[in-house]
Amino acid sequence: MTHKRDAAATREAILRAGVEAFTRAGYDGVGVREIAQSAGVTAMLVNRYFGSKEGLFAEVVEVSMTERTVLGDDPATLARDIAATLVRRTAPDADSLDPFLLALRSAPNPRAAEILRAGIEKHVERHALEVSGASRADTAVALALINGFWLMRKVIGSTALNETDEAELTETLERLFRVLLP
């Protein structure tokens, strides 16, 4: 009996394995063979679907940055929504499979950093600009604040940030985002 191949399912399995691997280990910390094994395919199939490790990484960034993980869609509640989501997503017990870790762990590679910058500008920055109407500089500072808070609370585990009441953290962040994204 012949097994019917499902190209879309195979591509999706490779992409999911790539998201997991690059988020966990960064661009330089994982190879095509490891991703292929995790997806249950050969390295040759990864290259057939994505062209190369770089091509797969570009797709992973595209998928990861398209999803709204912190930024909301309502200009009237943007500052509050970002603050509340950021506090929730960076809680010590929150899921750690996120675009921030993908960027943090992959950015040391210059080519990966270029791909990340393009994905962030295309999806995250553009969305923030459209929703907030803020300047590009203020939007970039707001994104830097999000990333710095994420780094200090979730990755480094700042005692002050993790022991402060979440309502208080949310209120402080909301005030800052109201200044940057009026």
Image (cartoon, grey):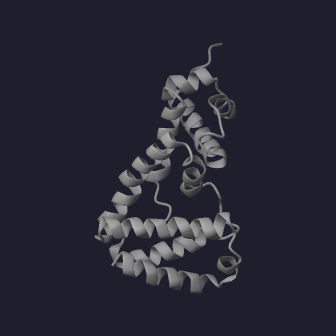
**Residue at position x 50%, y 61% from top?**
69
Residue 88 sits in which quadrant?
bottom right
Residue 17 sits in which quadrant?
top right
Answer left or right for 30 relative to 62.
right
Residue 143 horizontal/vertical position (percent): 45, 65
Residue 9 or residue 127, whichever sits in front: 127
- Evaluate whether residue 28 shows in this view: yes
**Residue at position x 62%, y 45% from top?**
26
Residue 21 sits in which quadrant?
top right
Residue 92 horizontal/vertical position (percent): 69, 69
- Evaluate whether residue 71 shows in this view: no
Q: Quadrant of the N terminus?
A: top right
Total numbered labels placed on residues in the image: 0
Residue 45 or residue 115, whichever sits in front: 115
**Residue at position x 55%, y 57% from top?**
100
Residue 81 or residue 6, whichever sits in front: 81
Residue 98 horizontal/vertical position (percent): 58, 56
Q: Is residue 41 above or below residue 168?
A: above
Answer left or right for 164 relative to 64.
right
Q: Is residue 87 above or below residue 168?
A: above
Residue 47 horizontal/vertical position (percent): 54, 24
Q: Quadrant of the C terminus?
A: bottom left
**Residue at position x 45%, y 80% from top?**
176
